[in-house]
């Protein structure tokens, strides 16, 4: 079955119930949310009654909690060795894992980090150190999904090789998975017109079973542009046909697909985009 949803809001007052209602308004059967604003670390305490009510609503509408994704804030950067920034990022990631566990979700998407001029090797070694530190102290089963990045600025995780090197360094490998992002893959230089070849390469290096989430976005920029600007489905350089081929791929049929496309004139495009995708898919 097609598991499709989008990024939705999470507000202090409406909590997870508000997020579920937003997802349902798009006719989605999953969703992704940030536990607070993506760009800051202000996090309110979790209202467990609200979570309970949200789960009831999810059950009534066939949303499986194991398909719901949480995205960590961008402010976490595990690749920077500056001591205060490194410690801050590790602590925040630890707290975030606890929050995801309290929500009862399984997956936390994380941008690996930016090496800020230190170089890829040092960036990777910092990320490995951070993940080992955080995971050694965490007793939840929440899986951290490293997102494939566009390679904007000094982002680490642009290539499958870089992601593999991170996983290789982590002791608790069962706690690490991957989130593919179609816009990022395109901007990083992976041609989605040859998606089978891309998946093949991924499988040889990392293993397809590590893919637990796919962000479905078109791109405003061309292959290898290293830009990371999302475009609405079918309006960008990847195009509807290619995105549909990714979604229809039988190997990835049980992997949740999440839209992070831009609002149009202040309005979420997700209801229309999900309808468009459903019309064109057969999984
Ligand atoms: Fe992301
Ligand atoms: Fe993404
Ligand atoms: Zn992006």
Image: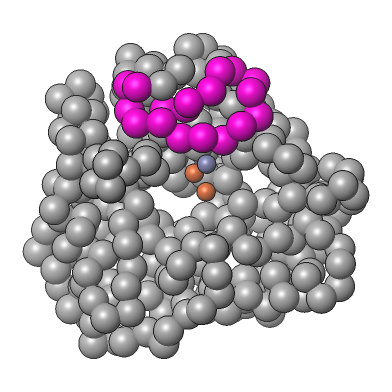
**Horizontal placement of 92 versus 245: left or right?**
right
Q: In which quarter of the image is the C terminus?
A: top left
* Mark count: 0
**Horizontal placement of 258 versus 98: left or right?**
left
Does the magenta run of residues contain 105? no
Q: Percent from the top left, x then y, of residue 8?
A: 31, 57
Color encoding of the figure? one colour
The magenta segment is: 218-235
26 lies above or below 264: below
Residue at 23 percent of width and 76 percent of height: 14
Residue at 21 percent of width and 72 percent of height: 17
| Residue sticking out furthest to the left | 60
28 lies above or below 14: above
Q: Percent from the top left, x then y, of residue 2?
A: 24, 37
| Residue sticking out furthest to the front | 265
Q: Percent from the top left, x then y, of residue 1?
A: 22, 37
Question: Relative to the observer, which residue lies in front, 197 or 24?
Answer: 24
Quarter location, residue 223: top right
Quarter location, residue 102: bottom left
Does the magenta run of residues contain 225? yes
Magenta part, dominant SS = loop
241 lies above or below 211: above
Q: Percent from the top left, x then y, of residue 35?
A: 43, 70
Question: Relative to the observer, which residue lies in front, 158 or 223?
Answer: 223
Question: Relative to the observer, which residue lies in front, 204 or 270?
Answer: 270
Evaluate whether residue 136 shows in this view: no
Residue at 30 percent of width and 86 percent of height: 48
């Amino acid at each position: 079955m097609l598991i499709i949803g989008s990024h939705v809001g999470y507000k202090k007052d409406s909590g997870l119930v508000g997020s579920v209602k937003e997802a349902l308004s798009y006719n989605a059967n999953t969703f992704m949310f940030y536990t607070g604003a993506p760009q800051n670390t202000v996090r309110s305490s979790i209202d467990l009654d609200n979570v309970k009510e949200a789960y009831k609503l999810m059950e009534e509408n066939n949303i499986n909690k194991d398909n719901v994704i949480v995205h960590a804030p961008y402010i976490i950067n595990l690749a920077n060795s500056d001591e205060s920034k490194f410690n801050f990022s590790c602590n925040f990631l630890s707290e975030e894992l606890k929050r995801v566990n309290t929500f009862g979700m399984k997956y936390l998407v994380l941008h690996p980090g930016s090496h800020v001029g230190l170089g890829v090797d040092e960036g990777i070694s910092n990320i490995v150190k951070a993940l080992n530190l955080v995971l050694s102290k965490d007793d939840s089963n929440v899986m951290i999904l490293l997102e494939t990045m566009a390679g904007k600025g000094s982002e680490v995780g642009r290539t499958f090789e870089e992601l593999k090197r991170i996983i290789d360094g982590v002791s608790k490998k069962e706690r690490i998975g991957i989130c593919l992002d179609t816009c990022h893959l395109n901007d990083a230089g992976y041609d989605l017109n040859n998606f089978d070849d891309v998946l093949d390469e991924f499988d040889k290096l990392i293993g397809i079973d590590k893919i637990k989430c796919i962000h479905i976005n078109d791109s405003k920029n061309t292959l290898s542009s290293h830009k990371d600007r999302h475009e609405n489905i079918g309006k960008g350089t990847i195009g509807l046909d290619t995105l549909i081929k990714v979604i229809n791929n039988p190997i990835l049929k049980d992997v949740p697909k999440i839209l992070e496309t831009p609002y149009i004139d202040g309005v979420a495009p997700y209801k229309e985009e999900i309808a468009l995708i459903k019309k064109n898919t057969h999984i």
